[in-house]
């Protein structure tokens, strides 16, 4: 089931479109990169509302991730062998994908990494990268927020722009 079908199914079962978009933006697989197209193409929400809900939803998990990733991952790795393998894989993968940008550019690199609307970039991975590279919460939070704001603008322009061009040509 794709994101559009999932959104339609949730809507048919009584969830309001705004809540569905907010939830999509909070989930690591979708984040606002998935929430904005759903808000526009499935629910036809206005661009300002789509942006606002998606950014808020994408930012909701940021502080909890930054605060809880270290103690949670340590506890899980101590108590479950498969979680140790999972976190080793996750942290190694994140390090490989972000190392050059974050080490070379610091906070700016973290912001750009979060802002780039590609798969496996975004707030969740940015928070993991901040943890992996030992960036303190107060130093990681502003670039992650800025990256989410920029990503929201980029994805909105792409989503609403493609839609406008398609309706103009169609």
Image (tube, helix red, strand yellow):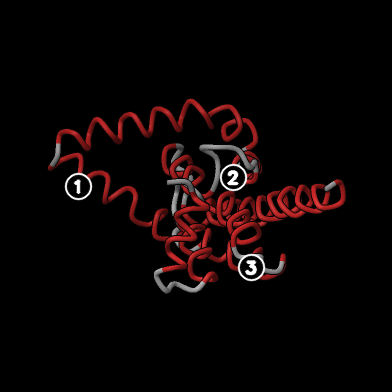
Q: Position of residue 65 (x, y in %)?
A: 40, 54
Q: Position of residue 102 (x, y in %)?
A: 57, 35
Mark nearest the camera among 3 and 2 is: 3
Question: Which of the numbered marks, if any, corresponds to residue 114?
Answer: 2
Residue 76 falls in image quadrant:
top left
Q: What residue sits right under mark 3 in the picture?
A: 52
Q: Secondary structure at mark 3?
A: helix
Is 32 situated above or below 95? below
Mark nearest the camera among 1 and 3 is: 3
Q: Is residue 57 left or right of residue 109?
A: left
Q: CA distance from mark 1 to mark 3?
A: 35 Å
Is 151 situated above or below 15? above
Q: Position of residue 91 (x, y in %)?
A: 38, 33
Q: Secondary structure at mark 1?
A: helix
Question: Which of the numbered marks, if any, corresponds to residue 75?
Answer: 1
Q: CA distance from mark 2 to mark 1?
A: 27 Å
Give whichever of discs 1 and 3 has the lower sequence position: 3
Pointers 3 and 2 in contact (C-beta within 8 Å): no
Residue placed most toward the observer, 151 or 29: 29
**Dot 1 crowding, Cα within 10 Å, few <14, some 14–19, many 20+:** few
């Amino acid at each position: 089931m794709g994101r559009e079908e999932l959104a339609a199914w949730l809507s048919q079962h009584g969830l309001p479109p705004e809540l569905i978009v907010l939830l999509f933006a909070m989930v690591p697989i979708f984040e606002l990169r998935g929430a904005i197209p759903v808000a526009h193409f499935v629910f036809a929400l206005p661009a300002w509302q789509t942006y606002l809900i998606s950014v808020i939803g994408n930012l909701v998990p940021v502080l909890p991730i930054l605060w809880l990733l270290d103690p949670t991952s340590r506890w899980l790795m101590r108590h479950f062998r498969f979680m140790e393998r999972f976190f080793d894989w996750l942290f190694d993968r994140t390090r490989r994908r972000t190392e050059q940008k974050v080490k070379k550019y610091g906070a700016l690199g973290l912001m750009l990494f979060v802002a780039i609307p590609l798969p496996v970039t975004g707030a969740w991975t940015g928070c993991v990268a901040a943890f992996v590279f030992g960036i303190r919460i107060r130093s990681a939070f502003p670039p992650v927020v800025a990256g989410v704001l920029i990503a929201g603008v980029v994805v909105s322009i792409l989503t609403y722009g493609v839609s406008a061009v398609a309706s103009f040509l169609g």
